[in-house]
Amino acid sequence: MAVRCFFLGLVIFAFVIDTSTVFSYDRPPARETLSLGHLFDDISSSSPQQVHISLVGQNKMRITWITEDHDTPATVNYGTTEGNYDLSATGTVSKYKYMLYKSGEIHDVVIGPLKPGIVYYYRCGSDTDREFNFKTPPSQFPIKFVVVGDLGQTGWTNSTLTHMAASDYDVMLLPGDLSYADFFQPFWDTFGQLVEPLASSRPWMVTQGNHEIEKIPLVHPKSFTAYNARWRMPYEESASTSNLYYSFEISGVHVIMLGSYTDFESDSNQYKWLQADLAKIDRSRTPWVFVLIHAPWYSTNEAHQGEGESVGMKKSMEELLYKARVDVVFAGHVHAYERFTRVYADKADNCGPVHITIGDGGNREGLASNYMDKTSISVFREASFGHGRLEVVNGTYASWSWHRNQDDQPVSADTVWLKSLSSDPACTKQ
């Protein structure tokens, strides 16, 4: 209890000195944070916990898990038949400290090459009791994504995860704000436990939000310590030098994950990397391009208006995305849903990206329910918890739908067909 009070005291201190985390608008009450510490009471110290997977290159998968035991090997045994593991790979073990907290042993193993559209069964470390499985994404269209931000670990989060599981998706995209640990590191552990059933069976591709920063001047001056240690993404494979921004290609789609809370000015490493990454895209191979950020560039919600991470990043990078004919930009941060028409420089533009805010996964802070006057470029908006489903049918068409958590039942509230800009002759002439 004393340790918990110490952490909470530092949280209050950090909120005072970091105005980016102070919320100046009212939200309706959210559901309480789930109590999850009991989930792994009956397993051994060498058993894998918080297992999640992520894509690495065209045909590999990263398996990440945590154990309490310091002597558990970073080994994954896997195969295409349940209980029969004829393949194996080894990786690395790491850990981190955050003030008084010491993490468990974080195991990181990349397996492959893997065949597309196949179910693989795997075991982690020396444990023989827990078997997991995942299905690799298809090598070509169609491919299904789920998209949701600001997830947290509340009763609404659990409802969202249940609805996601029913969608039979291939890849999950998360535009920041994962655990809402907010300095109290054990909440990273409980978040990993909560999402393990889904995150161990389909790749979760994430970027960071403001709740991942966890920087406390003088006490813990380094940002993103837990996020970078626990959720390593394939940044090196896309020639990035930071886990905070990267890209990957899957089944005809090029996905770019940007960092709203790292430097984005025109002389920054992220900006230069983005320029180079966009220049490498071959639209004949990946006719669709999606970008994920955390702080939205377009929003009619009263929440988080005028923040530098939104205004400054938009000013710096919007033209790059427009000239590259990015199809959709997904954002979180604002705890509500909103879809814009294709837009550029604050005006409707048929060759600009669709902007979608989907920061409504289930966070503990509640919904941002107050909106400004509606503009002509804002097509649909609603302050409800939910998630999005994006099915890319072929190189020309994709279906987007937003599913509201109404009375714990998934309700499709907003649906639209999208046409890729690479298939529009008016947008391919530059």
Image (cartoon, rainbow, N blue to C red):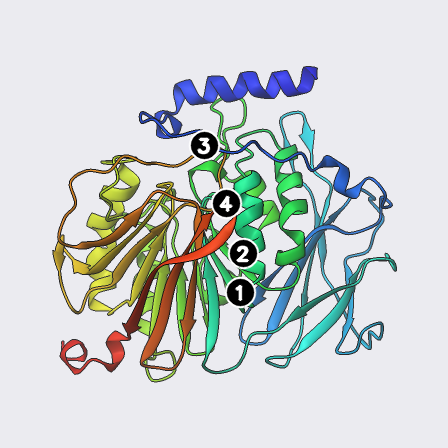
Q: Are marks 2 and 1 in contact (CB under 8 Å)?
A: yes
Q: Label 4 is placed on what type of residue?
A: Leu
Give the crowd class for mark 4: few <14, some 14-19, many >=20 residues within 10 Å: many
Q: Secondary structure at mark 1?
A: loop
Please tell me which residue is depicted at 32% across the width and 36% down the height of the picture.
Answer: 369
Disc nearer the start of the sequence (3/2): 2
Distance, label 4 to label 1, CA atoms, is: 17 Å
Q: Secondary structure at mark 2?
A: helix
Q: Secondary structure at mark 4?
A: loop
- Residue with the mark numbered 1: 167
Distance, label 4 to label 3, CA atoms, is: 11 Å
Mark 4 vs mark 1: in front: 1
- Residue with the mark numbered 3: 365
Q: Secondary structure at mark 3?
A: loop
- Residue with the mark numbered 4: 151
- Residue with the mark numbered 2: 163
Residue 311 falls left or right of residue 163 = left
* Residue 38: image location, x then y, percent: 76, 37
Disc nearer the start of the sequence (1/3): 1
Q: Quadrant of residue 34?
A: top right
Q: Are marks 4 and 1 in contact (CB under 8 Å)?
A: no
Please tell me which residue is depicted at 18% across the width and 59% down the height of the picture.
Answer: 343
Do we see residue 281 in this rendering?
Answer: no
Disc nearer the start of the sequence (4/3): 4
Q: Label 2 is placed on what type of residue?
A: His
